[in-house]
Amino acid sequence: MRRILKVLLWIVFSLIPIALVGVILGYVWLARSVTPATGEMVLTGLSAPVTVTRDENAVPHISGASIQDVLTALGFVHAQERLWQMEVNRMAGQGRLSELFGDKTIFTDRFTRSMGLYESAQSSASALDETDRKKVDAYVRGINAFIDSPGPVFGSKYSPEFVILGHAPEHWTSADVIVTLKLMSVTLAANIDDEVFRLKFSRLGMSDPEITDLLPPVPGDTPPPLPDLRQVLGLQSGTLKTGAAAADSQFAALNEIMSTGASNNWVVGGARTETGKPILANDPHLGLTAPALWYLAHLQVKNGEGASKNLVGVTLPGAPLVLLGRNDRVAWGFTNTGSDVQDIFVERINPANPDEYETPQGFSPFEKTPVAIKVKGGDTVTFERRTTRHGPVLPADYRGLDHYLPGATVASLSWTALAGDDKTISAGLKLWDFANVTDFQDGMRDFVTPMQSIVIADTDGNIGMIAPGRVPVRDPANQIMGRAPSPGWDATYDWKSFIPYEELPRIYNPADNVLATANTKIVDANYPHFLTFDWDEPWRFDRIKTLIYNANQQTLETNGKVQGDAYTSAYAALARVMLKLMDGREDVDLDVIKRLRAWDFTEDRTKAEPLLFNAWLRMAMKRMLEDDLGDAFPSYWQARADAMMRWLEPNGARDWCDDGRTPVKESCGDILALSLGDAIKDLDARLGSDRSKWNWGLLHYAYGAHRPFAQVSPLDQLFNVTVPASGGAYTLDRGKSAFADDVNPYRVTHGSSYRGLFDLADLNRSTYIQTTGQSGNVFSSNYRDFAERWANIRGITISTDERMYHDGLLGIWHLKPQ
């Protein structure tokens, strides 16, 4: 017994202190990976010294003698602050995530490698002219200079993710930069999902009117009837093969990348502002991450006489561009146009030779390339990448396609983002030099993908819009028009050409002195070219029109309030229909009905009503559609106001409210009453029965998810960035949730990733904010310090005047030529 006590005492007084010391030393080792505010470094390739001054908000003001020097410094700074984020994005583009994360990302890698995304990036890098190649190479030198630099005497050079996962970064190349930009095209690739939905619905035996009820066009659009895909493609009809939903869910990690976000932007002419100069606003809605997608920066080139030219705004770590922001005379803001630049083609395999597929001229061989995916902790996965005349062959199980397509067929994809001559980065490198709106509109010729609706303003008082990008021209006889997979053996469905640059949507100084886009239709019936039939619902655009188009004497402050507007006109319209169907019913929670009738339709994070309505809508969709869609339902399950109003109409294409799984015929009122009970029961389970404590922000919080530690407890508590948020699926202050996520159906996975407000009377008064903080290192005080400010719709200023940002600065780095 005495011996046991001695051993226990030795453990207590010896091993535990040793372990404690080890923990402290480990913490210090990792904490020293935070970038010092002050330092110096010799960088190969610089022509003259460069200074990097981090202001009180950790925004770097990078000043040098040439654009190449400044871009080298930007690469160095990006690597200092965000190298892990850059590494994950690069390896996602290369199809190598499984080397980091193991078998959970094999399906994502298989998709990326099947598409040949990195090979197209390599071709695009080779297509750059010498001037642009030198600028990209200068940026790459800066990244690699940090990778090659010595670390601290005691401490990690790299952020904790590298240490925890035992990963060391490789040197960067120009193709890595291009593929980082191409990932934005993957992120905004919405059309492929709409095509798969229509394929699924056709396979389930639905008619064109029924499919239109599920995916309605925007008001005023009149697409031709969709041909019966069962006949065109030879689809079967009826119950799906078992496992369709499971096959679809395999690509969950890819869904995090293909977030299909949305955006707002507008520009107000000087006739409507207090200053007499334009005001421009932009807030792109994308998947929320920790760290934020964007990194704020000020880039400055000074000549020998002290004159300078500046770029200010958000950069994408891994790319040498200020993508959204302003130069000395022009400000700009992007939204995703949503043009249809993807077509899935169903290719028939030769029954006599599986290495061939059918073309209009007969059978032709697939191009084949062997692919090997290395998997951390597992065996290498090999497959054969196949390519057709239309493009790469999609993985057979992508979105469960093999459960829907006819036998002896594969699906290939035509997509502008895979073009080898894509020089979109060249358009971005011109942003330094545009002096006015016309310069900008004429200078986006190299912009290929993803097509963007760009509003522009200049200090002379001009405003405008241009939607640059490569958009396919389809045959007038093609009645599918990109809405669903097309027969690959019929040349009618092939792309014929692309819309000429001069004929892309463009507006200059409109008569009413205001322009806005919000992912809905941007052209009228007179526009001669087809862009898409899958525009976003126009609720956000209509709200902008109400608040901006009808207002004069506008200021930065009034426009900031519009960016933070949480009124949901979509739910105002939908709730009236749903509540009307509850009239006279006694089988519902009358207290909840009373509260929803009194709701002002503002999705305020402190209120319970938006929580009650979203929970009701979520459960109503489940009760109404699960029987009709079966395995196709989970991927479709999200807020769909326009479609819901069609389902509740008495003259819909089918009786969506009746549950075909029950012997009785339910009315829409019956289903809504039952689903309200479901919603209250679900909220009771999540929040407890005391409704006085319920509010929207408890479950509707901005979820900045870290990759990969969002999936690892308890590291998720340390690395994720969360904050209660107002707004919803249709508000200008957008906060979109994933209804299909049973664990967290209301948390915000997509929202305003950045907000910019630009005053063309004094560009230094412009404000900016992103969702988390400047640093990508969780040990930094700047990792999450923007989150509360972002949630409260407040921004920061980034002046180009040294006297304005030297007060309170964090420190200065001096980068010197070798």
Image (cartoon, helix red, strand yellow):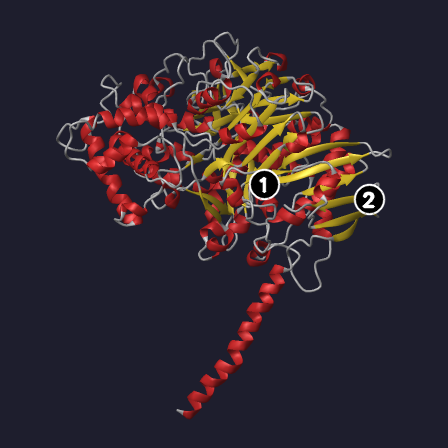
Q: Is any part of residue 658 visible from this angle?
A: no
Q: Residues within 10 Å of mark 2 (few under 14, many from 20)?
A: some
- Name which residue lies at 35% across and 41% down: 246
Q: Are marks 1 and 2 in contact (CB under 8 Å)?
A: no
Q: Which residue is mark 1?
A: 94
Tell us which disc is closer to us: 1 or 2.
Answer: 2
Q: Farthest residue toward the right?
A: 304
Drawn side of residue 786 relative to residue 690, left or right: right
Q: Is any part of residue 378 visible from this angle?
A: yes
In the foreground, 134 or 59: 59
**Secondary structure state at the residue bearing disc 1:** helix
The x and y percentages for residue 768 are 60, 36
In the foreground, 204 or 730: 730
Reply above or below: 120 against 97: above
The x and y percentages for residue 560 are 53, 31
Badge 2 amino acid: Pro
Comes first in the chain, label 1 or label 2:
2
The x and y percentages for residue 808 are 68, 48
Q: Residue 668 — which label?
A: none
Q: Which residue is mark 2?
A: 49
Badge 1 amino acid: Gln
Reply above or below: 359 against 121: above
Q: Farthest residue toward the top?
A: 526
